[in-house]
Image (tube, rainbow, N blue to C red):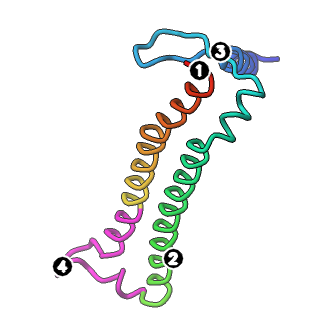
């Protein structure tokens, strides 16, 4: 193997070897607690976990629907009224409404993703942790 392949292989091995470690919020390395299959099944069957999973799915599908409708509308307008996006913003301007519409689609996608990640990693993750602690008796 040449040098680059060795480095890639080493990086992959290091990643998977360190995968059992977790960094907490302060940056200290902690051992991740292993959960046995019986405990995992208890967590999966817990009513609060099922409620959290249902809520997470509804939020995810809701945001997906918003993005889907936005993209379909954007493409539909491009296909049916291309002159709308080709029109300059103002007289003598080289910037068209299509540029702003495209930027809006991209920015709204990023914002929607950020909101979902914030919800999923915030409230929903704490709900999951609470269920795990409850099941483990901590």
Q: Specify which label sits upstream in the sequence, 1 or 2.
A: 2
Tell me if residue 63 is in the magenta stretch: no
Question: Quadrant of the image for the C terminus?
Answer: top right
Nearer to me, 96 or 71: 71
As measured in the structure, the alpha-carbon distance from the residue carrying label 3 to the one carrying label 4 is 56 Å
10 Å crowding of disc 1: few (<14), some (14-19), many (20+): few
Earlier in the chain: of badge 3 and badge 4, it is: 3
Front of the two marks 3 and 4 = 3
The quarter holding residue 37 reads top right
Mark 4 Cα shell of 10 Å, populated few (<14), some (14-19), many (≥20): few
Q: Are the residues tagged 4 and 2 within 8 Å (C-beta)?
A: no
Say the numbered circle drawn on residue 137.
1
- Residue 35 rendering spot, x and y as whole percentages: 70, 22
* Residue 22, picture quadrant: top right
Binning the other alpha carbons within 10 Å of mark 2 as few (below 14), some (14 to 19) or many (20 upward) gives few
Q: Which residue is mark 2?
A: 72
How much space separates mark 2 and mark 3, taking CA atoms? 42 Å
Q: Earlier in the sequence, mark 4 or mark 1?
A: 4
Task: Report, in whole angstroms, how far the alpha carbon at label 4 lies from the one at label 1.
Answer: 66 Å
- Quarter of the image that includes the N terminus: top right
The residue positioned 49% from the left and 71% from the top of the image is: 71
Q: According to the image, label 4 marks what residue?
A: 90
Camera-nearest residue between 132 and 29: 132
Label 3, secondary structure: give it: helix
Q: Which residues are magenta?
A: 82-105
Which residue was labeled with disc 3?
Answer: 18
In primary-sequence order, the first of circles 2 and 3 is: 3
Find the distance from the CA under tag 1 to the CA under tag 2: 48 Å
Q: Nearer the viewer, residue 108 or 98?
A: 108
Does residue 79 lie above or below 9 as drawn?
A: below
- Which mark sits nearer the N-terminus, 1 or 3? 3
């Amino acid at each position: 193997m040449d040098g680059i392949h060795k480095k890639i292989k080493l990086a992959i091995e290091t990643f998977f070897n360190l995968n059992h470690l977790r960094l907490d919020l302060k940056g200290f390395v902690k051992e991740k607690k292993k959960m046995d299959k019986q405990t995992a099944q208890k967590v999966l069957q817990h009513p609060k976990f099922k409620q959290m999973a249902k809520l997470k799915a509804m939020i995810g599908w809701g945001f997906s629907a918003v993005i889907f409708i936005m993209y379909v509308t954007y493409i539909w307008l491009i296909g049916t009224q291309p002159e709308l996006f080709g029109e300059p913003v103002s007289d003598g301007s080289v910037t068209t409404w299509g540029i702003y519409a495209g930027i809006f689609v991209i920015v709204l996608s990023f914002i929607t993703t950020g909101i979902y990640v914030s919800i999923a990693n915030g409230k929903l993750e704490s709900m999951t942790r609470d269920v795990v602690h409850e099941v483990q008796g901590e």
